[in-house]
Image (tube, rainbow, N blue to C red):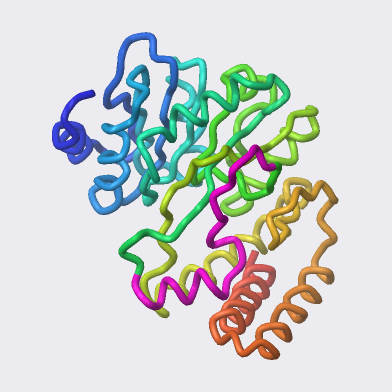
Amino acid sequence: MGNCGIILGRILKLHPKTVMKLFGPEKPEISVIVPTIRSEEELPRLFEGLVKQTITSFEIILAYRFYPSGLARNKGASIAKGEYLVFLDDDIGLGSDKVLENLRDVLKSDPQIGLTGASTLLPPDANAFQKRVAKEIPRMIFPVVEKLTESDMVTTQCWAQRRECFEKVGPFSEVIERGVDPEYRRRVRDFGYKIVIAPQTWTYHPPPKDFVSFIQQTYRNGRASARAQKTHPELVAPVPDEGNPDNRADRGFLFRILRSLWKLLEGIVRLRFLLVSERIVYSIGYIIGRIKT
């Protein structure tokens, strides 16, 4: 594969709302689709991992500064040529040189597997605050598994599917800001597919670097969740903290409030300051989002 610096140089010349194939053969086996807003800040680590992959028959497609994320991923998929689509977030690092190979092999092994993804670990250079976030906040990390594991922790941070699955299930929602992944996973399961974590496959995903960033992200998530609940409740799917598959319909506003209060109480009892802060700020964002939407 070509030089990582050349690829990054092309990215810096892109204009907002651009979808572009950055690299790859005319008929790739895999299309790697990366939505990004802050490409020059986040992408070097990801591309350094991509250039080392054992599979070389893949293209890289960048969807630059589209919003929301579902629109960005659909734009990328619209020009993809590969038999397999791999969606990656711009701020991750690949855990090994076999990530693409492992994801492809899982999909090849069983036609009933609709989505496969990677475990999530902290980056090796994570600071003390990020380690604390990962310890206290659910769904920040997911340990590496030794065998195929059905899980709700397959997210667009790193997931792969056959092109035929994407065409059958349909595109990502373009009308909700948050909750795109669980809504799509629900559709995949409704079509009878399985969703699994690939063995010995992981990415590094950094939590917020400091308390201010953590609070800002939590508040945004709360507001976005409220907007989705109020404007498109039919698209809202549950997100279990434990990562176990959950196909139940969303239980509505009252249930969310009660669940937040329960998590708040849990954080207080277990002396988890960040979990308590996350529950309070998320709830504030959610309530404001409900009022102002």
- Residue placed most toward the observer, 53 or 192: 53
Specify the quadrant of the image occupied by residue 124. Answer: bottom left
Does residue 283 appear left or right of residue 92 in this picture?
Answer: right
- Determine if the magenta segment contains residue 145: yes
- Going 37% across and 21% down the picture, which residue do you hit? 58
Against 62, residue 92 (above or below) is: below
Against 85, residue 260 (above or below) is: below
Specify the quadrant of the image occupied by residue 266. Answer: bottom right
Q: Quadrant of the N terminus?
A: top left
- Residue placed most toward the observer, 284 or 57: 57
- Residue placed most toward the observer, 223 or 203: 203
- Going 43% across and 55% down the picture, which residue do you hit? 205
Question: How many tags in the picture?
Answer: 0
- Going 48% across and 35% down the picture, which residue do you hit? 87
Q: Which residues are magenta?
A: 127-149
Residue 274 picture location, percent across and down: 54, 81
Residue 76 picture location, percent across and down: 44, 29
Residue 253 picture location, percent across and down: 80, 67
Residue farthest top in this picture: 27
